[in-house]
């Protein structure tokens, strides 16, 4: 038998990431057959709000400058000017002091997570995530030779604090907290943040450091509150992981950061480790042009109202049809309950030309994820299909009884 021409672990990962691939393939086939406008694709979390005017102004300004050294290698941490702008923004956003010395610019939040995990994990260390979770976490953790441990959430999809406490073991090195959450759109409450912080404080020690990675890339996409409760300032060893992918609606530009407050024990060592890994993981530094742009628009925000209106239209209609769902408070995801087995329901939806991702793909069967970062027209035109899909399941149930 010929040897596997690629690494076994990667071959395994390609197979286990099958939901993403599967929906992509289904979408491609359906669109080829029916035309793009007749397929209602809610499967991808690709931001589609208009980037803010400040972003385009900053790009024009930076492009107009003629200064050849600006295109050279730089410190692996990023430009001082950009890190200062990010530190000012993060301090305001978190209502806590952050300084440029604790900011590392990265190629998006995905790079930031990889860098941070590699910086803190020893082989076999455990990282707790809450289900349902962003599926890429498993790859990032395993690439850093860690082991992902899944802790449950309650019926309202907030972390179950008692279960979390039980999930912490002597091997637990980090937890990843993502609020507003992908895939649920749930914003973790002030109570949840305080509860998590208290439990972490009880277990964290200099002998067994316990880090909290706050994956906060959606924290400014919130719809019913003015300020998203923040876990990072409540925890001694917190690392803010974020990016401009969603705030500015520019994920293709790959610009993000890590922010570490000055009072983290041995912060200098942590900063040196993350800068080193930015280099040795091959990113070297975050894109220079984008760093200069961000220095000029670090607090700009895309049109969040666009997502709010999409949410209200989609979730309101789904509820009217009889779907069970909590109104998501942030990000651009809804996570309704599935009327039948979630994987079977995804097939029903596909027959009605709707693409969605089963909750099983995020470690939470019985639900499905809809990304409502789509054109308004896609939502409007999809609604009869959502109605028909639910009716089909109900009719089948009646016929079977
Ligand atoms: C929860 C979560 N974390 C991280 C990322 C990666 O973001 P970025 O595009 O900044 O790498 C995403 C992207 O969708 C995400 O949903």
Image (cartoon, rainbow, N blue to C red):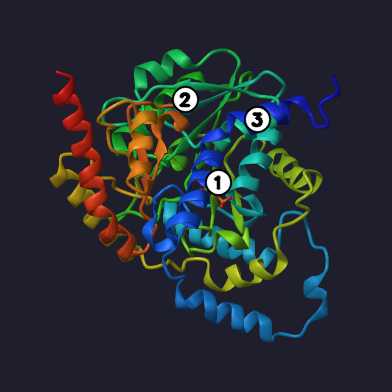
Residue 72 vs residue 204, the one in the foreground? 72
Q: Which residue is mark 2?
A: 200
Q: Is mark 1 within 8 Å of ligand 1?
A: yes
Q: Residues within 10 Å of mark 3 (few under 14, many from 20)?
A: few
| For the residues bearing labels 3 and 2, Cβ distance under 8 angstroms | no
Dot 3: what SS? helix
Q: Is residue 124 left or right of residue 218?
A: right
Q: Earlier in the sequence, mark 1 or mark 2?
A: 2
Residue plotted at (61% across, 46% down): 110
- The label shown at residue 13 is 3
Say if 15 sits above or below 351 in the image.
above
Q: Residues within 10 Å of mark 1 (few under 14, many from 20)?
A: many
Nearer the observer: mark 1 or 2; the answer is 1
Residue plotted at (69% across, 39% down): 270
Q: Which residue is mark 1?
A: 241
Dot 2: what SS? helix
Say if 144 sits above or below 110 in the image.
above
| For the residues bearing labels 3 and 1, Cβ distance under 8 angstroms | no
Using the rendered image of the protein, determine whether residue 190 is visible from the camera's viewpoint. Answer: yes
> Which corner quadrant holds the C terminus?
top left
- The label shown at residue 347 is none
Residue plotted at (65% across, 66% down): 291
Dot 1: what SS? strand
The residues tagged by marks 3 and 1 sit, at their Cα atoms, a distance apart of 24 Å
Q: Is residue 336 left or right of residue 61?
A: left
Residue 233 vs residue 309, the one in the foreground? 309
| For the residues bearing labels 1 and 2, Cβ distance under 8 angstroms | no
Percent x, y for residue 46? 48, 55
């Amino acid at each position: 038998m010929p040897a596997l021409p690629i690494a076994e672990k990667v071959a395994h990962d390609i197979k286990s990431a099958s939901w993403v691939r599967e929906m992509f393939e289904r979408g491609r086939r359906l669109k080829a057959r029916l035309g793009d406008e007749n397929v209602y694709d809610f499967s991808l979390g690709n931001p589609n709000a208009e980037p803010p005017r400040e972003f385009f102004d900053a790009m024009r300004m930076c492009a107009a400058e003629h200064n050849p050294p600006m295109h050279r290698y730089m410190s692996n941490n990023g430009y001082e000017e950009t890190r200062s702008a990010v530190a000012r923004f993060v301090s305001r956003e978190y209502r806590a002091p952050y300084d440029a010395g604790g900011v590392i610019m990265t190629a998006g939040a995905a790079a930031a997570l990889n860098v941070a995990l590699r910086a803190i994990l020893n082989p076999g260390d455990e990282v707790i995530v809450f289900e349902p979770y962003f599926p890429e976490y498993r790859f990032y953790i395993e690439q850093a030779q860690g082991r992902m441990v899944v802790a449950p959430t309650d019926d309202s999809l907030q972390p179950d604090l008692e279960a979390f406490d039980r999930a912490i073991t002597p091997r637990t090195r980090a937890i990843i907290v993502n609020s507003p959450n992908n895939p649920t759109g749930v914003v973790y409450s002030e109570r949840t943040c305080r509860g998590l912080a208290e439990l972490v404080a009880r277990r964290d020690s200099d002998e067994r450091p316990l880090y909290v990675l706050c994956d906060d890339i959606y924290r400014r996409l919130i719809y019913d509150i003015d300020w998203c409760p923040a876990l990072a300032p409540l925890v001694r060893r917190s690392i803010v992981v974020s990016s401009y992918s969603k705030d500015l609606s520019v994920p293709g530009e790959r610009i993000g950061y890590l922010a570490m407050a000055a009072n983290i024990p041995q912060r200098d060592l942590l900063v040196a480790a993350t800068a080193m890994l930015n280099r040795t993981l091959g990113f070297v530094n975050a894109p220079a042009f984008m760093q200069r742009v961000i220095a000029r628009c670090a607090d700009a925000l895309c049109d969040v109202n666009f997502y709010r209106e999409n949410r209200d239209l989609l979730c309101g209609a789904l509820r009217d049809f009889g779907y069970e769902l909590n109104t998501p408070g942030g990000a651009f995801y809804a996570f309704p309950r599935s009327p039948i087995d979630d994987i079977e329901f995804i097939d029903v939806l596909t027959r009605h030309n709707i693409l969605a991702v089963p909750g099983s793909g995020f470690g939470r069967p019985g639900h499905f994820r809809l990304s409502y970062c789509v054109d308004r027209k896609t939502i409007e035109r999809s609604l009869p299909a959502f109605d028909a899909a639910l009716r089909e399941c109900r009719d089948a149930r009646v016929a079977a009884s």
